[in-house]
Image: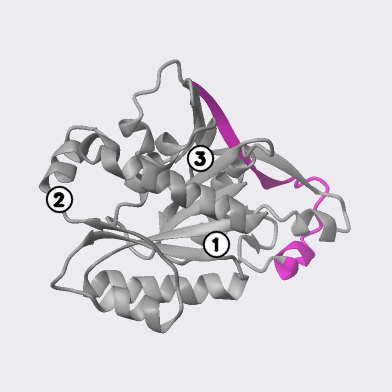
């Protein structure tokens, strides 16, 4: 079972809910932090004995002694990652998508591949949480390859909870790909509603069931609830704005530290999602 926790914008409480859901589960949970550009899930878990592995992508390497500079590699590259000059071939690593097309297209077999590091995956264990977190190296332009590497740690025999990147672009679609259900976390504000609509439009294109949790809910702004009702979207939970939650968060505590009464409600949400996905 794979549950992705996503949001249209940053700062809605996506990581807060990911951790709270993991802590509310009765069974052991595999928690994956796929927000690889700004990973912070580990701050709220205080896990020990972290292991770390380097993640590489394949980048083309040209053996000039074999190359006749025909330009076939440049023609097949859809990302302009290769430039062929009179007696030189330039590879722009930051544009390469590691598709291998240039290597297949080369009539001289002059192109091979080399490993290029893009980030790391750290892992750790506790009594009820198996945790994996990706961290993109500074200067790297593309996060999807690292997100896919983190998602490769999903476990078929466990409940997997994915803390996704914010937004609705390629990193988010990569993170939610293959999920059984998506929990969308939004906030009761015009900005939250605007970005929620954008993300919902994207999710509907990939046809994955979803529901909404409204964080920092307020009686003074009900437009999010009205939108969900008009669109027949399930509101899974409304969490009221709370100074206690903000204080707990600033001290590295979880949502359940401030609102332990939410644990049975979150457990019910997990049970409901798993029943619907059977």
At 38% across and 42% down in the image, what residue appears?
A: 264
Disc 2 marks which residue? Answer: 242
Q: Secondary structure at mark 2?
A: loop
Image position, residue 10 (x, y; %)? 31, 58
Give the numbered dot on residue 32. 3
Q: CA distance from mark 1 to mark 3?
A: 15 Å
Nearer the observer: mark 1 or 3; the answer is 3
Image quadrant where one finds the C terminus: bottom right
At 23% across and 32% down in the image, what residue appears?
A: 252
Give the numbered dot on residue 173. 1
Magenta range: 51-76
Q: Earlier in the sequence, mark 2 or mark 3?
A: 3
Image position, residue 247 (x, y; %)? 13, 39
- Magenta span includes 211: no
Image position, residue 271 (x, y; %)? 52, 48
At 86% across and 50% down in the image, what residue appears?
A: 109
Colour setting: one colour
Q: Earlier in the sequence, mark 2 or mark 1?
A: 1
Q: CA distance from mark 2 to mark 3?
A: 27 Å
Q: Secondary structure at mark 3?
A: strand
Q: Earlier in the sequence, mark 1 or mark 3?
A: 3
Q: Is residue 6 visible?
A: yes
At 46% across and 52% down in the image, what residue appears?
A: 269
């Amino acid at each position: 079972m794979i549950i992705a926790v996503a949001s249209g914008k940053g700062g809605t409480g996506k990581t807060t809910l990911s951790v709270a859901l993991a802590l509310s589960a009765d069974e052991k949970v595999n928690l994956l932090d796929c927000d690889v550009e700004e990973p912070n899930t580990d701050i709220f878990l205080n896990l020990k004995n972290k292991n770390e592995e380097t993640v590489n992508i394949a980048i083309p390497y040209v053996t000039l002694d074999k190359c006749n500079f025909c330009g076939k590699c440049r023609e097949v590259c859809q990302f302009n990652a290769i430039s062929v000059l009179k007696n030189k071939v330039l590879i722009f690593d930051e544009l390469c998508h590691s598709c291998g097309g240039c290597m297949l297209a080369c009539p001289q077999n002059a192109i091979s591949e080399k490993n290029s590091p893009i980030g790391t995956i750290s892992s750790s264990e506790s009594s009820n949480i198996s945790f994996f977190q990706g961290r993109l190296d500074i200067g790297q332009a593309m996060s999807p390859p690292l997100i896919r590497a983190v998602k490769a740690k999903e476990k078929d025999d466990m409940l997997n909870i994915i803390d996704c990147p914010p937004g609705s672009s390629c990193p988010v679609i990569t993170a939610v790909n293959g999920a059984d259900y998506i929990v969308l976390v939004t906030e009761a504000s015009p900005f939250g509603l605007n970005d929620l609509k954008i993300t919902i439009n994207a999710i509907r294109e990939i046809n994955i069931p979803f529901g909404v949790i409204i964080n920092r809910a307020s009686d003074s702004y009900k437009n999010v609830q009205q939108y969900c009702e008009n669109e027949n979207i399930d509101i899974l939970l409304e969490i009221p704005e709370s100074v206690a939650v903000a204080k707990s968060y600033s001290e590295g505590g979880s949502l359940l530290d401030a609102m332990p009464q939410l644990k049975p409600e979150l457990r019910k949400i997990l049970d409901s999602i798993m029943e619907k996905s059977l």
